[in-house]
Image (cartoon, rainbow, N blue to C red):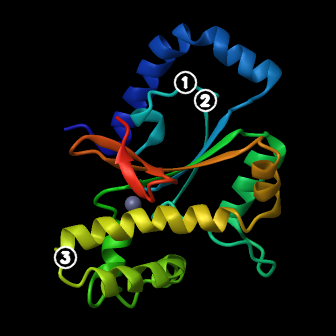
Amino acid sequence: MTSGVEKLLQGYHHYRDNKYEKKRALIEDLVSRGQHPEVAVVACSDSRVDPAILFQADPGDLFMIRNVANLVPPMEEEGTYHGTSAALEFAVLGLGVKHIIVLGHAHCGGIKLMMEPEPYDSAFKYVPAWVSMLDAAHRRVRATMSNASDEARTRACEQNAVLVSLENLTTFPWVREGIDAGELQLHGWYVDIAAPELSAYDWEAGKFTAIA
Ligand SMILES: [Zn+2]
């Protein structure tokens, strides 16, 4: 049986001998002129929701930021190692992306863990602190959907996580400035890989609706 790592090497060989050859001109251009992606995606680290695979992206298309539960934290002055905020800063100020897509997803392990009655093993230190930015959204879902199924509540929490991230994005001044100048657009998307269905948050309707 092929191990996980051997499968990666086989994949790389296939990439080098096939895709690289087909995309050689594009890749050479990306190296000589640098990357100019129009889109930054904040996605979950979940192995099943790789935006490059889902959207069939080419090299240079997507500036990718992935973390547990596709979260954008609010801007914080304190602290040093703000990985997600640094990546966003690079995308907006360094690369001038025109769109930021927060991509939530069904069956999110980070959200599911948070919703369990005894969510965390004591070995977990960073995950509880990270997803605690969803506490208010989680409480809201519990309070307003007490009669709903676990599945419906989990989905609501997953979609709320996208909205929290969108709201937190606007705490960064360069995001607000980009939006005000009409140079930056924020999008809240949600994918269910089993359905399969892609939905987007409709700002006017105030809900997610299927787009693909
Ligand atoms: Zn997830």
Which of discs 1 and 3 lies nearer the camera? The answer is 3
Q: Which of marks 1 and 3 is nearer the N terminus?
A: 1
Q: For the point 48% across and 35% down, which residue is it?
A: 52
Helix, strand or loop for disc 2: loop
In the image, which disc is placed on residue 148? 3
Residue labelled 3 has its Cβ within 8 Å of some atom of ligand 1:
no
Helix, strand or loop for disc 3: loop
Give residue 153's position: percent from left, percent from top: 27, 73
40 or 147, which is in the foreground?
A: 147
Instruction: Please state the total of marks drawn on the protein image.
Output: 3
161 or 147, which is in the foreground?
A: 147
Q: Which amino acid does label 3 sit on?
A: Ala
Which of discs 2 and 3 lies nearer the camera? The answer is 3
Q: In which quarter of the image is residue 72?
A: bottom right
* Left-right relation of 108 to 181: left
The residue under label 1 is 58
Q: Which amino acid does label 1 sit on?
A: Asp
Q: For the point 40% across and 28% down, which residue is it?
A: 11
Look at the picture and state if 49 lies above or below 128: above
Q: Earlier in the sequence, mark 2 or mark 3?
A: 2
The residue under label 2 is 61
Give how far apart the Cα atoms at labels 1 and 2 are.
6 Å
* Left-right relation of 2 to 134: left
Please say whether residue 83 is visible from this viewpoint. Answer: yes
